[in-house]
Amino acid sequence: MAGVPEKARFYLERAVPQLREFESKGIFSADEIRSLVRKRTDFEHLVLSPGNKPSDWLNYATWEKSLETLRAKRCHRLQIRTSSKYTGQGRIFGILERAVNKHPGNLDLWKAYLAYAKDMKATKRYRKVMSRALRMHPAKPELWVMAGKRSASNGDMQAARGFFMRGAMICTRDATVWLEYARCEMEWLGRMDARRGKKGGAEKALEEQAEQSDDEIKLAGGDSEDDDEADENDQALLPDPESAPENKVFDEDTTKKLAGNPALDGAIPLAIFDVSKKQPFFNSSVAEQFFDVFASFATVSSQARIVQHVVDSMIELYPNDPATCFCHIRQPLINVDINTPEYPKALREALVRLRSSLSTTRNQSQLAEKTKLWMEPILATDDLDPGIRTVLEHTRRTLSSP
């Protein structure tokens, strides 16, 4: 069995053609090449040693990334256009692949691998690596969130919902996947509302929603080669017009029926919240996090109804909890700018709720602390109305007094 020096020499010899290119094109001097060879040799012996750590692989990949960045800058400065970037990228991918094979249980290595594939826009590799990472770490909510957000950012809500739903079924110890799933759905509703305001946008939005199959949960990003059509040289093939699926045609009656689609009126975020209430991790703090998520989407037309549903549920389940009172206090100020004429009226309603809640809450000090932290960024605003500032400062002093 080959020892560490033989293995290191094998990987170092694979980089010889690139080093010769550096020398022949004057990208690096001979002394610089000898220096980077010594550095690369040290890294190879370190990661191939029996006691190597995941941090050693990350440092090795980081050094190779810096070398590739330096090569690109020098090629740009020297106007060398024949130096390929794919050799350096392939070497970095190879290091990360070896790293996850050596330490498959280390989540940081998988994240670094996925982050680099995303930065390099290696879509096919990203899907395969994500599939392997999810199979290796199915109970890690951050991986499911990464996969769902990636699909949603690419416009594939069907795949995004599949990732989030699978993650929600597996990761039941905390609310991470559930909260990010709700956030993703609110972002999608915001995009749909924006498209409704454009000519022909409503019909397209409805057709897109109708073509989604939310009942199907599939683990996208598998090792199947059917995801990307490519030839034997891994080059993308042009689609065949004859084999392309025909677009569905929606008549006027169907469009009218789809106009009342509950999914476009906030039914999915509401369902996520309602189902999460049955999970063991759900409590008043998690409900408050849902409130914060929904309250941050001012452009969603159904936001007020969703927020009201969350507040009503909190009042029903945790009537005198500080988190419930705090959400109830902030509700009138959602989407109200401090420089608008509506703000004083909304603030007056919030302060009335504050006084009422302080007398009924089971933890007055915790509610007072939450309220003071909420007031600080408002008071830090430079152009805040003097009257509003006076009222808030007086309220804060009142909360500070025993």
Image (cartoon, rainbow, N blue to C red):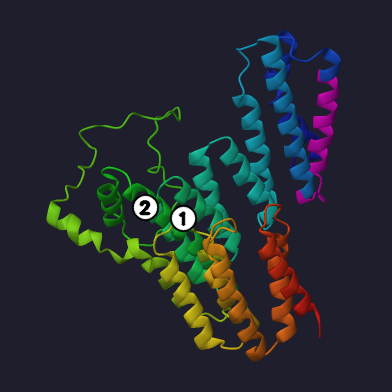
For this orientation, the residue located farthest to the front is 387
Front residue of this view, candidates 67 and 207: 207
- Up/down of 197 relative to 164, above or below: above
| Quadrant in the rendering for residue 319 | bottom right
**Helix, strand or loop at mark 2:** helix
Residue 137 in sight here: no
- Up/down of 188 relative to 169, above or below: above
Percent coordinates x, y for residue 64 in the rendering: 73, 32
Percent coordinates x, y for residue 390 in the rendering: 72, 67
Query: Residue at 51% of width from left, 53% of height from top?
Result: 149
Query: Residue at 20% of width from left, 42% of height from top?
Result: 246
Range drawn in magenta: 33-54
Front residue of this view, candidates 99 and 155: 155
In the rendering, which numbered label is found on residue 187?
Answer: 1
Please tell me how crowded label 2 is: few (under 14), some (14-19), or many (20+) other residues with Cα within 10 Å. Answer: many
**Residue type of the residue flagged with mark 2:** Met
Question: Mark 1 vs mark 2: which is more N-terminal?
Answer: 1
Instruction: Residue under label 2, please give it.
Output: 192
- The quarter of the picture where the N terminus appears is top right
| Quadrant in the rendering for residue 322 | bottom right
**Residue type of the residue flagged with mark 1:** Glu
| Quadrant in the rendering for residue 210 | bottom left
Percent coordinates x, y for residue 225 in the rendering: 41, 42
Q: Is residue 254 left or right of residue 119?
A: left
Q: Is residue 347 left or right of residue 235?
A: right
Report how far apart the C-alphas of labels 1 and 2 lie in the structure: 9 Å
Query: Residue at 74% of width from left, 27% of height from top?
Result: 67
Residue 203 colored in magenta in the image? no
